[in-house]
Image (cartoon, rainbow, N blue to C red):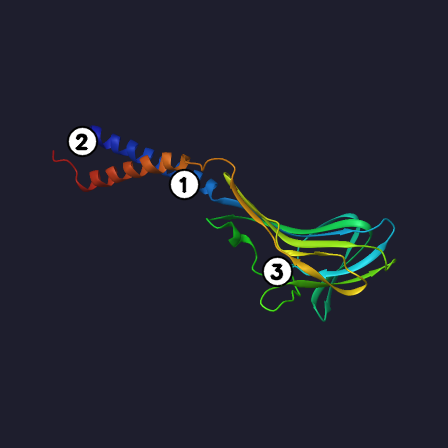
């Protein structure tokens, strides 16, 4: 009997390890988040109107992409905090963004703590941001909107926030734009993945049986 019991213990140990490893692997997939944060700014202007704007800084250095004839000149220090100097003609957009991958229960922990728009004004909370405008037609109507955004995706769920920011029609020189409240959405794309339990449960039970068997070997 001991000769039979030895191989059975080896096989059971191997199966237990495989189950626990597979359970851990699928649990890892469930908790792996792809996290992206962004700062979007859109400008709506009549065709042919050239403009320069000093917009709030997101607090972090991020790569950017543009659409339309928009150029990012650089950062400048102003009496209202750090601003980014952008220029363009007509309508256009600029998007600053970066991303990371993390494993955990809270995807927001992947967002760098320094992500915050500069120069917010208000008594107890931010109610406005000041932008500076210079354009080829001071009477032209420009609409400027901007805000921070956040998106996190895992295997069975996602969370997005369009982020707080500003929106309005700046006039020439320094002009306040009202604060805009963001909105967040958290959804499951499908039922939570229960595959880890199918492996971790039996693997743990089998491991417990093996430990008990080793501690209490049968009497020959």
* Sequence-first tag of 2 and 1: 2
Say which quarter of the image contains residue 85: bottom right
For residue 49, the mark is: none
* Mark pair 3, 2: CA separation: 68 Å
Q: Would you call the spot at circle 1 few (<14 residues within 10 Å), some (14-19), or many (20 or more)?
A: some
Q: Secondary structure at mark 3?
A: loop
Q: Is residue 116 left or right of residue 218?
A: right
Residue 52 position in % (x across, y down) = 81, 59
* Residue 154 visible here: no
Query: Which mark's residue is nearer the viewer, 1 or 3?
Result: 3
Residues at circles 1 and 3 in contact by the CB criterion of under 8 Å: no
Closer-to-camera residue (84/189): 189
Q: Would you call the spot at circle 2 few (<14 residues within 10 Å), some (14-19), or many (20 or more)?
A: few
Q: Would you call the spot at circle 3 few (<14 residues within 10 Å), some (14-19), or many (20 or more)?
A: some
Name, please, the residue furthest toward the left: 220
Query: Which residue position is annotated with label 1?
Result: 24
Give me the residue at 47% from left, 44% from top: 31
Give me the residue at 73% from left, 56% from top: 168
Query: Which residue position is annotated with label 2?
Result: 2
Residues at circles 2 and 1 in contact by the CB criterion of under 8 Å: no
Residues at circles 3 and 2 in contact by the CB criterion of under 8 Å: no
* Residue 148 visible here: yes
For residue 116, the mark is: 3
* Mark pair 2, 1: CA separation: 33 Å
Query: In which quadrant of the rendered image does the N terminus lie?
Result: top left
Q: Secondary structure at mark 1?
A: helix
Q: Is residue 26 left or right of residue 216?
A: right
Closer-to-camera residue (128/217): 128
Residue 170 position in % (x across, y down) = 77, 59
Above or below for 39 versus 9: below
């Amino acid at each position: 009997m001991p000769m039979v019991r030895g191989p059975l213990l080896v096989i059971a140990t191997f199966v237990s390890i495989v189950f626990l490893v597979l359970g851990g692997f699928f649990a890892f997939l469930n908790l792996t988040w792809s996290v992206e944060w962004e700062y979007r700014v859109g400008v709506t202007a009549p065709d042919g109107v050239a403009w320069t704007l000093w917009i709030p800084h997101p607090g972090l250095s991020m790569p950017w992409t543009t659409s339309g004839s928009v150029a990012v000149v650089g950062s400048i220090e102003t009496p209202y905090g750090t601003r980014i100097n952008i220029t363009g003609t007509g309508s256009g957009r600029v998007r600053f963004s970066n991303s990371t991958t993390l494993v955990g229960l809270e995807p927001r922990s992947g967002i760098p703590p320094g992500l915050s728009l500069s120069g917010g004004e208000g008594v107890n909370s931010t109610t406005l941001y000041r932008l500076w405008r210079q354009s080829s037609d001071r009477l032209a109507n420009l609409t400027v909107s901007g805000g921070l955004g956040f998106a996190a995706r895992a295997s069975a769920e996602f969370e997005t926030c369009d982020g707080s920011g500003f929106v309005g029609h700046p006039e020439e020189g320094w002009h306040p734009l009202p604060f805009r409240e963001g909105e967040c959405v958290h959804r499951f794309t499908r039922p939570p993945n229960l595959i880890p339990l199918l492996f971790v449960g039996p693997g743990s039970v089998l491991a417990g049986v093996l430990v008990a068997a080793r501690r209490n070997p049968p009497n020959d």
